Amino acid sequence: MSRSITISIILLALIGFSIFSLFRLQDINQEMTDLLTSASLAAQNQEFEKAKELSKKCIERWHEHEHFAGIFIRHNEIDEMTGLVSQLKSFIEQKNTALFCGTADRAITLINHIFSSELPTLTNIF
């Protein structure tokens, strides 16, 4: 009897932690997508100071989220996202809108891929 209770508690803890991590990753995905989109729009509108501040905020927020995301996400995707986000500041300082927007779009695509690959769907399970 005690084994079944222990197994049930462990199973409930794992399910709870998994649900928590999905909601947390969804929040990270939404926040990073919003920041990157806003920075890209600012760069397209030639608002370089605003784009620079948004890219700086994006870098800071990603580095805060990076530690939590490292628990669930493959490290090569985290490293790629870190590299993309880190390039944004130098591109906007050079006022290279094309590279800035292209890198921001790649980062948005990657963060959306990271989130969708963590969803418990049949495609991801099998």
Image (cartoon, helix red, strand yellow):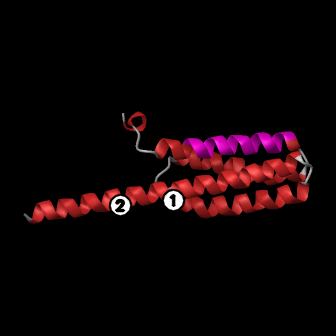
Q: Secondary structure at mark 1?
A: helix
Where does the C terminus fall, quadrant-wise? Answer: top left
From this viewpoint, is residue 126 visible? yes
- Measure how far apart labels 2 and 1 are at the Cα level: 12 Å
Q: Amino acid at mark 2?
A: Gly
Residue in the image at 69% along x and 53% along y: 34
Residue 33: image location, x then y, percent: 67, 50
Residue in the image at 53% along x and 47% along y: 115
Where does the N terminus fall, quadrant-wise? Answer: bottom left
Q: Amino acid at mark 1?
A: Arg
| Residue where numbered disc 2 is placed | 16
Tell me, for residue 24, which label it has, or none. Answer: 1
For residue 83, above or below residue 68: above
Identify the magenta region. 98-113
Quadrant for residue 3, please give it. Answer: bottom left
Q: Earlier in the sequence, mark 2 or mark 1?
A: 2
Q: Secondary structure at mark 2?
A: helix
Question: Is residue 68 toward the left or the right of residue 35 in the image?
Answer: left
Residue 41: image location, x then y, percent: 82, 48
Residue 43: image location, x then y, percent: 86, 49
